[in-house]
Each structure stands twice: as structure tokens, then as C-alpha cells.
Image: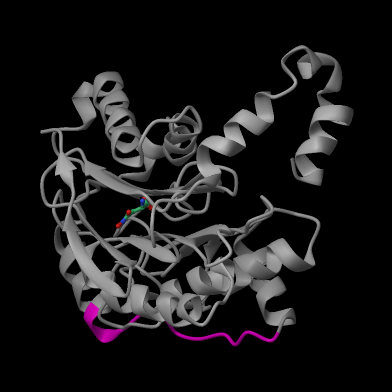
Amino acid sequence: MNSRRKFLQTSLLGGVITGSSDFWSRIALQFDKPEKDTFPAVIATWGPNLKANAAAWEVLSKGGRALDAVEAGVRVPEADPNDSSVGYGGFPDRDGNVTLDACIMDEFGNAGSVSFLQHIMHPISVARLVMEKTPHVMLSGEGALQFALSEGFTKENLLTDTARQAWEEWKKKSEYKPKINVERHDTIGMVAIDAQQRIAGACTTSGLAFKMAGRVGDSPVIGAGMFADNEVGGAAATGLGELVLRTLGSFLVVEEMRRGVHPQKAVEMVVKRIVRKYPGQVKENQVGFIALDKKGRHGGFGIHTGFNYVLYQRGENKVYEAGSLL
Ligand code: SD4
């Protein structure tokens, strides 16, 4: 039994669980035995994120840390002007401002996040510094920007001509329908397991296109847009953030896996829960989850067809069509 678990057992929960003293060790055993060659591995939402996966693999294949891998991975779409859902090139809110949400977790359960951050191309790296250099988990808006600037990030214009044109076009009707196209949106959620079986996750987005100013989605909320637990695995979400926020979807996926459920089954259970709970809101909205467990097993599932994900494992980077409920 590792010392952290022992500590939990003897000091925090000792009184409660001494009766079933091998509770923690049973859970650990269930996940500690990997299948063959299943890690390192990295999984990310959406097919176009093969490049992001490759950047993460660069770190993993050299024996690097899962945390460094997910940060390096999601920085790829953050800097890509052609990705209209993440970082630079992301579609703005209805006032024309690009506002970004991101979060990250390491193998110790540390977490960092930024929401409603403007002018910074790599919100994931700011989230990491929130985790590593402050006593907090989340910084938002102006405070997050000031923190980023104090850490040496530079202020940039993130609104590309293409994104501006899309916004100008949207303004002609100015219909406030924060509905997500059921087939294509590219928020990146990523989970990695490294050669030492350490697990980390990251998620980054510009959120819904033409959203209300100040709207924050699921992506920077630990447990909603992403959750990682080194004893179990990790999960991440994409799609209509409001549906994921109300269900703390990624946390729920991880908790299902903690009970021993296979990642594929776990993501299916959570999508079903959302559909059952919000039947009126799922027809035109997509939500998709990816998951990777401590054994390097993976899964992906969406409400609607069209959701896919990428997995780099055993030296191969592949797109997987996720199953769907509707
Ligand atoms: C949000 N979940 O802000 C994000 C949107 C998304 O691809 O996934 N876009 O609600």
C-alpha cells in the first residue's frame, strides 16, 4: 500500500474504514494491473486533434510526465488560427470579444483553471501556473489576465479576420441561440497516462460562439469539462457546456470507472443520464465524453452521431468514431 493511501486510511478516514481495512487497496489493485502495452497513451476529443495528440506523444514517448504531455498537446489547437473553438481564431462572444476557458489536473489531484480570460493565446499554461504558483484553483476574467501578465504572458489580439467575419455575419440576425451544431465543434479535452502510469488531463476552449458576455461553460470547471484521478483515470467533455455543468459529467465518468466500470461503459452511462434528465434539450445539442483509465483502456460516446476522438497508443495515432445514443 503506498504511503498516501496509508495516510488516508489511518488519519483521515481511519475510524470509518478500519473495519474494511483493505477497501483502498482493493480499489488500487483493480487498476494497478495494466493490460499489455496500454501505456503511455493519450486521448483527445475530436478527429482534427491528431496533431495535438502527436505533440503530447512527443513528451510521453520520451518518458515525460503526463502533465507536460497534456499541456503541450492542447497548446497546438490553442495556437491554430483555423480552429474556431479554441484559443487564437476562436469565435468571439456576441460583443466580439474572444473569451477563453481552460483547466488542468496533475497526478496528485492538483488542479488549476482560468475562465473568461481574454487576450492570452495559451490559457492552459496560465491554468497550470494557477495550479502551481497560487493557493487557488480558479482565476477568472481581469484577475486571470493580470496574473498571466505578471507571469510573463503577452497580450495578443486573438480575433482573426475569419472569426470577425463570422461574427459580422451572425450580427446581421443577432439570433441568440446558443445551440451547438451537433456534428462539429472542437473544444479539446485530453487525458494522458505516462510510462510511469501517472494520469493528467487538460481542457481548453473559446466556448460557445457568440455567447453572452461573461458566459462560462463547463470546460474550466473541474469535474465538469475534465476530471482526472491518478488512482482511476480521467475523462473530458465537449459539447453544450450547460448540460455538462448540471451533471458534473467528467467527474461522474471517473466515478463510474472507480466502481470498476469500463471507460466505454462509463461514458455511455453518463450520456444516458444527461439524455434521461434533460430530454427537451438534447435534440439539437451535442455532448460527448472521452475517458482513459489507469489500465490504459479507453472509451468515447456522444448524444448524437458525428462525435469522434483520437487515441495515441502503442505508437499509433488513430481517429475513433464514438458511438452515440440518438
Ligand atoms: C462550452 N463545452 O463552452 C464548451 C463548448 C464546446 O466545442 O465543447 N465546444 O460549452
Residue in the picture at 70% in, 73% down: 146
Q: Residue at x 41, y 76 (%)?
A: 57
Quarter occupied by residue 231: top right
Q: Coloring scheme of the render?
A: one colour
Q: Confirm whether residue 206 shows in the render.
A: no
Q: Position of residue 211 (x, y in %)?
A: 34, 54
The relative height of residue 235 versus residue 71 in the rendered view (above or below) is above
Q: Which residues are magenta?
A: 152-162
Q: Residue at x 30, y 68 (%)?
A: 91
Quadrant of image for the C terminus: top left
Going 28% across and 71% down the picture, which residue do you hit? Answer: 49
Q: Is residue 63 left or right of residue 82?
A: right
Q: Main secondary structure of the magenta part?
A: loop
Residue lying furthest right: 11
Q: Position of residue 264 (x, y in %)?
A: 29, 40
Q: Position of residue 169 (x, y in %)?
A: 15, 69
